[in-house]
Image (cartoon, rainbow, N blue to C red):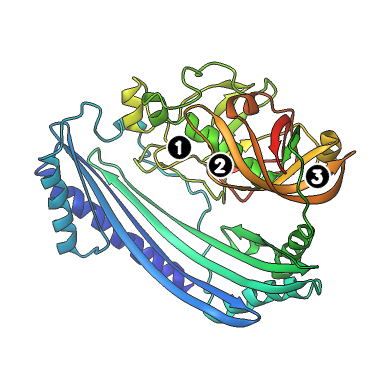
Amino acid sequence: MKVVTQVAEQRKALEQAVSQALELARAGSDAAEVAVTKSTGISVSTRFGEVENVEFNSDGALGITVYHQQRKGSASSTDLSPDAIARTVQAALDIARYTSPDPHAGPAEKDLLAFEAPDLDLFHPTELDAERGIELAARAEQASLAADKRITNTEGGSFNNHYGIKVFGNSHGMLQSYCSSRHSLSSCVIAEHDGDMERDYAYTIGRAMGDLQSPEWVGQECARRTLARLAPRKLSTMKAPVLFASEVATGLFGHLVGAISGSSVYRKSTFLLDSLGRQILPDWLTVEEHPHLLKGLASTPFDSEGVRTQRRDIVKDGVLQTWLMTSYSARKLGMHSTGHAGGIHNWRIAGQGADFAGMLKQLGTGLVVTELMGQGVSGVTGDYSRGAAGFWVENGEIQYPVSEITIAGNLKDMLRNIVSIGSDIETRSNIQCGSVLLPEMKIAGQ
């Protein structure tokens, strides 16, 4: 396959670029680390079956950080020629002369580095051209438009196919690289009925083309979601049980990520300060991290500092087991990096609940949230207030869509009081969990 040969050649060239940068940095620094990334791909979109956009991209970047006498300097370049790399290294060295000393600065400890990187089956390129991408996008869009006469407009179908290379090296002698691919297909349409217009979308994503749902599934799912939103009602202000659908429930645990990050902890800017080793979730709930999940969308053999990743329990039986630390935040806290420079890696939150229909039965009468809007969340206090849309449920059955409401609570209480998590796992995110049932939230309506 042509693309495989091209990637192999590019990977070798990028590894040489990292080696060059490290060699140049050696003379003027105590330590250095270099990361190079390259991304290549195609993005296409259609609207009413006509080609709306075709974009090819090929981007690369090199970033270097040097450390000298506890001073840090960083520089980057999108020009990967030898001369440009030399200038970038010199720029980082010059910057380090003017920064203040920081005893916590420096590369990751040598014994934490990934000198061996496992193959996580992340690279599944395809020789896909623009014509094939256009066909897939148009089929997804057409399946949406053909589903119901109330679907009157479209924002189009889109297809993306990208592959990337990541290379990391540092002055401890580490030099590792890996390749990855990502393919996605989506449709977004507008439905209209009695003067009301609603919009929604659906998508599929995977490391390999064979992992994607069919264009027809994407289009029909998009139509179903859009039609279900028609004729929304407003709710009166009240308190009621709330069920977060799986695609938005991941966001609840996204707030947990920020709250237990090392930087939030050493700055004392988190509502979970002093929570290490204490219960923050129900005692039946465990949050696992699986960075080596084959084909995982957030899988990686090492973090952005070269620290090897590993399977770990973030929360076990409701008790917080670890902060999420980079090398810097770990030193600030007197601990060791957990391999979270750059983010988390495939959180799995196993539920004990039923499928979505069963979760509706457990909800009984209350609100299902399928969309969240706004940024009204404080990571310091845990106060939570966001615009929402979804469905009102009575006796375990959806009655009608709702919109223009606000839901409010406090994240510390929300997380601790989770009633159940469903088996309807959302797998298209770096956080995988099912729908989440909360016993009560404030709902502000009309």
Nearer mark to the viewer, of 3 and 2: 3
Q: Amino acid at mark 1?
A: Thr
- Give residue 398's position: percent from left, percent from top: 85, 47
Q: Residue at x 75, y 40 (%)?
A: 423
* Residues under numbered marks 3 and 2 in contact, where contact means CB atoms less than 8 Å apart: no
Q: CA distance from mark 2 to mark 1?
A: 11 Å
Mark 1, residue position: 309
Q: Nearer the viewer, mark 2 or mark 1?
A: 2
**Residue 214 seen in the figure:** no
Residue 252 spot, x, y in % from top left: 60, 37
The residue at 41%/70% (across/down) is: 57
Q: Relative to 36, is 66 above or below?
A: above
Identified by mark 3, the residue type is Trp
Q: Is residue 412 above or below residue 47?
A: above
Closest to the observer, 147 or 69: 147
How many circles with numbers are drawn on the protein? 3
Q: Secondary structure at mark 2?
A: loop
Between the C-alphas of marks 3 and 1, the distance is 42 Å
Which-is-in-front pick, marks 3 and 1?
A: 3
Circle 3 is placed at which residue position? 392
The one nearer the camera, 317 or 356, is 356
Q: Which mark is residue 346?
A: 2
Q: Residues within 10 Å of mark 1 (few under 14, many from 20)?
A: many
Quadrant housing residue 364: top right
Q: What is the C-alpha distance between the residues marked 3 and 2? A: 32 Å
First in sequence: mark 3 or mark 2?
Answer: 2
Between disc 3 and disc 1, whose residue precedes? 1
In the rendered image of this protein, does residue 53 appear above or below residue 287? below
- Between 236 and 431, which is closer to the camera in this rendering? 236
